[in-house]
Amino acid sequence: MNAQLKPETQPIRINGQRLWDSLMEMARIGATPKGGVCRLALTDLDRDGRDLFARWCKEAGCSISVDKMGNVFARRPGKDNSLAPVVTGSHADSQPTGGRFDGIYGVLGGLEVIRSLNDHGIETDRPIEVVIWTNEEGSRFAPAMVASGVFAGVFTLEYGLSRADVDGKTMGEELARIGYAGDQPMGKPIHAAFELHIEQGPILEAEGKTIGVVHAAQGQRWYEVVFTGQESHAGPTPMPRRRDALLGAARVIELVNRVGLEHAPYACATVGMIQNHPNSRNVIPGRVFFTIDIRHPEDAVLAEMDRKVREGVARIAEQTRLEVTRLEQIFYYAPIAFDKACVDSVRAAAERLGYSHREIVSGAGHDACYLSKVAPTAMIFVPCVDGISHNEVEDATPEWIEAGGNVLLHAILGRVDR
Ligand code: HGY
Ligand code: MN
Ligand code: MN
């Protein structure tokens, strides 16, 4: 301990080992062979993770409530429970080949804040709530961040509950099936919100910085596309007569990548999902479904990328004599600027705790992006190994995990007074 500082001026800290152990225990739910997790939204495994979180929160003295989109709120009472709470949390659902930290780190980091306040016997004026936001990933049910979007009034409840997976199961049906179709109305006052997350990119690790002070998040647009050509025999059908839907999709995949590269260094452009029909080796594909994901920190550039994608899809369809049966933008939000006072709280906490830090823009979407529409919000990043995420090898050091938890604790403490 720093000798010249009296003990009480040393900032309190979380129990890093307890947070790490909780993350590793949670990672056993949906554990995959390569060391990641697969806890797709509203599956039995998602339910099991929610149940474990709720049990731990009750053991820490919290009450649990669930809203109509299945968002789980663990509430630590304050001295005055009529005051709007300070909120933290993230998501518990994962990608199919997800990692042990994406989302759940922000959920269990919030729980560790509660546990640490209990350890230190600290009572706060305001209540504190730790939230699991349903279906942040947008993998099983598109789009992403649906439930925080309904909470923030961006989507209607009817829209949210009607999102369906590839088997036609809706979020409403699956929430009821796993027992998380809550009765709480959507939306409520929040005094301030913080989300703790791994960066999911390479910047912090490359620069040797422990904390990312997230002041903004890039905007994104998601599309669903269906090309229709004509199934026919791969042998007797002469090349000039073909209407090959997969050829068209292949050219759009190249186009999307080019649009991303043309708007370097910040643009991102991805085709991540494709369904080829009938997907038989000796049948010329007659129909292909695929997705497009484009992102940029400036809305005008994102709009320019949108225009180029749409023009390119039309041009390629004409060249390959395909019908554009569907080109639908299913998700869009403009770049987000987080709340200056909350961002300052994060920076001040990192400085007080002596962590190296830098300002950073989030490349990924997060529930905090929608929360920022209804409450002063900011995010805290820590590095991840090689910047890899949405991959079973996703990893972080216990030191980074502890540092992020400490910054979250002090950012929250800076906002819990009346
Ligand atoms: O797509 C995203 O940015 C987030 O992982 N849902
Ligand atoms: Mn995430
Ligand atoms: Mn993710």
Image (cartoon, rainbow, N blue to C red):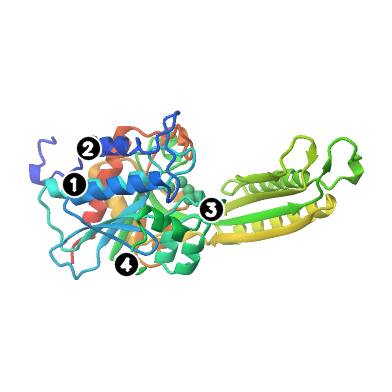
**Which disc, if any, is residue 115?**
1
Amino acid carrying mark 2 in the image: Arg
Where does label 3 land, which residue?
A: 165
Task: Give how far apart the Cα atoms at labels 4 and 3 are.
Answer: 24 Å
Q: CA distance from mark 1 to mark 3?
A: 36 Å
The answer to whether the residues at label 2 and label 1 have Cβ atoms under 8 Å apart is: yes
How busy is the neighbourhood of tag 3: few (under 14 within 10 Å), some, or many (20 plus)? some
Left or right: residue 283 versus residue 29 is right
- Residue 288 horizontal side relative to residue 54, left or right: right
- Distance, label 2 to label 3, CA atoms, is 36 Å
Q: Between residue 125 and residue 287, name the one nearer to us.
A: 287
Dividing the image into 4 quarters, which one contains the N terminus? Answer: top left
Q: Earlier in the sequence, mark 4 or mark 3?
A: 3
Badge 1: residue crowd in 10 Å (few <14, some 14–19, many ≥20)? many
Q: Check disc 3 and report its element: helix, strand or loop.
A: loop
Q: What's the mark number on residue 18? A: 2
Choose between 38 and 297: the one closer to the eye: 38
| Residue 187 vertical position relative to residue 215 in the rendered view, above or below | below
Q: Secondary structure at mark 2?
A: helix
Q: Which residue is mark 4?
A: 184
Of circles 2 and 4, the one toward us is 4
Q: Circle 1 sits in a helix, a strand or a loop, which is it?
A: helix
* Earlier-in-chain disc, 2 versus 1: 2
Secondary-structure class at tag 4: loop
The answer to which quarter of the image holds residue 130 is: bottom left
Q: Residue at x 29, y 36 (%)?
A: 25
Q: Nearer the viewer, mark 1 or mark 4?
A: 4
